[in-house]
Image (cartoon, rainbow, N blue to C red):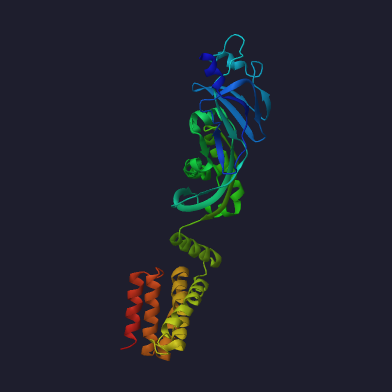
Amino acid sequence: MALMDFIKKQFIDIIQWTESGDGTLSWRFPMAEMEIQNGASLTVRESQLALFVNEGKVADVFGPGTYKLTTQTLPVLTYLKNWDKLFESPFKSDVYFFSTRQQVDQKWGTSQPITIRDNDFGAVRLRAFGNYSYRVADPRLFHTEISGTRDIYNVADLDGQLRALVLQNISAAIAGSGIAFLDLAANQIVFAQALAGQLAPEFAKLGLKLEAMTVQNLSLPEELQKILDQRIGMGMVGNDMGKFMQYQTAQAIPKFAEGAGGGGGGGIAGDAMGLGAGVALGQVLAQNLSAGLQGGANAAANAQAAAAAQQSQGVKPEDVMATLEKLGELKTKGILTQEEFDNKKAELLKKLV
């Protein structure tokens, strides 16, 4: 009876794995009730590693090549159960194959802006995204820490954990790079290198090797980007507030004129009136801001002369209303304070009396 049971047993003579291209990191060779025949053939292809596990303990690791499984090629199997002194009996052992090729184009990105310290702005909220690639480098560690006894472990199973590691280390990488935010966009390679240096030890703890890291885009939330654009505009004109106000007025005139003429030529003052009032407003604000920055008798005299010239020319009610509307838009955008708006409004209303 024992002889019949022995004959009925199925023995494994060839152990190998061909990847199916589905992003598999680890695959367990199907054993069921079968046993590995002493002298069986093990084939490990390039970009693979094979791991033998007996009763939960790693027995040996095989790199690319073809092996005949005997006591000469598996000396560690002398410690496995059910091997007699001649080591000619079949044995059972879980065999795991690992793909060591690069897993490329793995995406990472900030789902929400992250806050970082910055030398120029103090603190900014930053968005970023890019990709990275990695490979299994230590199958023992990867097996014990990540894949375990699962039949198949895929790239998708690890994706969330690795992306979380990237996001967790972004702030530290930026601080370690010493690059200010305004320079990050021009130094994305340097930033990517700093991020890779920060992440490599974290990947190694999982039995992985980080092969490449790219940063494809760095940006601010929309509201912060508008503030940065204004700061850049101020830097371009320097202390010449007259030029800055003319630039701001020129940017706002098309929208203002469109709104004024939106009713088929009616509006508050019509297209032409809106355009004229916008230009006049830009000149008045530029003169006032220039006087406030420069100070002195000459600036004050120029402002008074300009005001006197306007009064001598007379002000039409429709011009005043158009100017007030434009002032309201500037207040809404934060260019004018409430106090500045109220003072200017009072001055303009006096001219209607």
Res 66 → quadrant: top right
| Residue in the picture at 65% in, 18% down | 70
**Where is residue 338 shown, x and y percent of the image?**
33, 70
| Residue in the picture at 52% in, 30% down | 143
Q: Quick check: 78 left or right of 324? A: right
| Residue in the picture at 55% in, 54% down | 217
Q: Can you see residue 180?
A: no
**Where is residue 341 shown, x and y percent of the image?**
35, 74
Please tell me whether residue 171 is drawn above or below residue 86 in the rendered image.
Answer: below
Please tell me whether residue 324 is drawn above or below residue 195 in the rendered image.
Answer: below
Q: Nearer the viewer, residue 92 or 302?
A: 92
**Where is residue 202 shown, x and y percent of the image?**
52, 35
Q: Quadrant of the C terminus?
A: bottom left
Please tell me whether residue 38 is drawn above or below residue 322 in the rendered image.
Answer: above
Q: Can you see residue 163?
A: yes
Q: Nearer the viewer, residue 314 or 236?
A: 236
